[in-house]
Amino acid sequence: MARPGDPDGGELRVLKFGDRDIHPIAAHSLTAADAARLQARGNQTPTVYELHQRDADAYYHQFQEAIRGNPFAEVLVDRGLDSYQAADTRLFVTDDLRAGGAIFGRELGSLFSLGDTYKGVSRTLTQVRVDSGGDTIICRGTKLRSLNEGSGFLAVAETPGPQLKIDLPGDHGKLSIMVFDPGAVKEGLHETLQPVLVHSKTAGKAAAAHYLQLLHDEGRPAALAHLESVRDAARASTTTIEGVDLGALRAAGFGSDRIKPLKTTTASPSPPPVADPGSGPAVEAAGLGE
């Protein structure tokens, strides 16, 4: 069957994984404007192929291969094969299966590159997934956050993370919850906006979802005003329940009837920043955009 975006305009090409034939379910190409924008930065923009869940094991194998021996593997999340086979997961790869990225519901994740593939392909994989409905990224580290800002993502929440064995610049392993809002990034808000400090991914994702809903329904001023109210609530409350910031959750639209107190703790202060050793090629070469 002919598919839009297939480079030959005809049957989808068969991909090879060792001796195994992989039959994609769709081919995705960037718009002319997006392709020109990325190519002007020196990136290649190949056609990206979407896999059926039956071929999730091939994707998972390549993702684990990218992690193996990678000094930044600690910042990646191995979700397990079942997650890649789930009905709400979509898998995207290059024709050589040497790079790929996934969408879990609306969250972009599991971006990988084995290095010997298309130059700068992580940008294309990110844009294709955004075009396919992805709008949220959760990443660890200021380097990855900066890379995602370059693709139009804005950090709206962050959570202190544990000390990691690897040396990530200035973040101590903190998580950034980011939403796709290229207009805000174009205006430079990523340089001035202070993300809401929360103490779990749950609270951060709640704030991000509410921001995106307001951005869609009422526009950026309303979304930014709401984010400020969430930040004020987070500052006013240091009480957490199993690591979840109650002030942030309530301000994000979660009423008391939906918050069940199980164990009360006190939020720990963020660790002091460390010196930024500089950006090196390791993350960029690995294609670790989230």
Image (tube, rainbow, N blue to C red):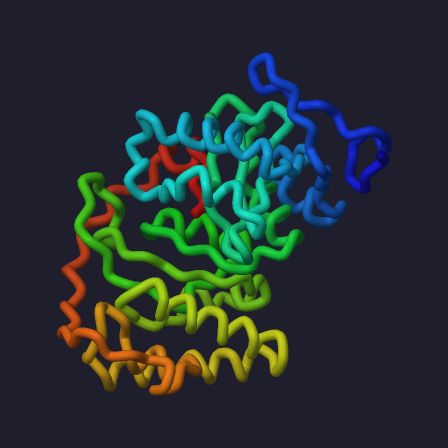
* Residue 105 % position (x, y): 54, 56
* Point 24% across, 61% down: residue: 160
Residue 249 x/y as whole percent: 35, 78
Task: Name the side, left or right, on which 106 lies relative to 173.
Answer: right
Placement of the N terminus among the 4 image quadrants: top right
Q: Residue at x 36, y 33 (%)?
A: 282
Q: Quadrant of residue 268?
A: bottom left
Relative to 67, say whether 83 is above or below: below
Q: Is residue 12 left or right of residue 138?
A: right
Q: Left or right: 81 with respect to 24?
A: left
Q: Is residue 216 visible?
A: yes
In the displayed structure image, the side of residue 22 where residue 264 appears, left or right = left
Residue 234 point in image, percent of width and height? 29, 80
- How many numbered discs sit on the rendered protein? 0
Residue 226 vertical position relative to residue 130 in the rendered view, above or below: below
**Relative to the observer, which residue lies in front, 259 or 266?**
259
State whether residue 229 appears in this view: no
**Residue that extends furthest to the top in the rendered view of this protein:** 19
Residue drawn 47% across the image and 26% down it: 115
Q: Nearer the viewer, residue 7 or 203?
A: 203
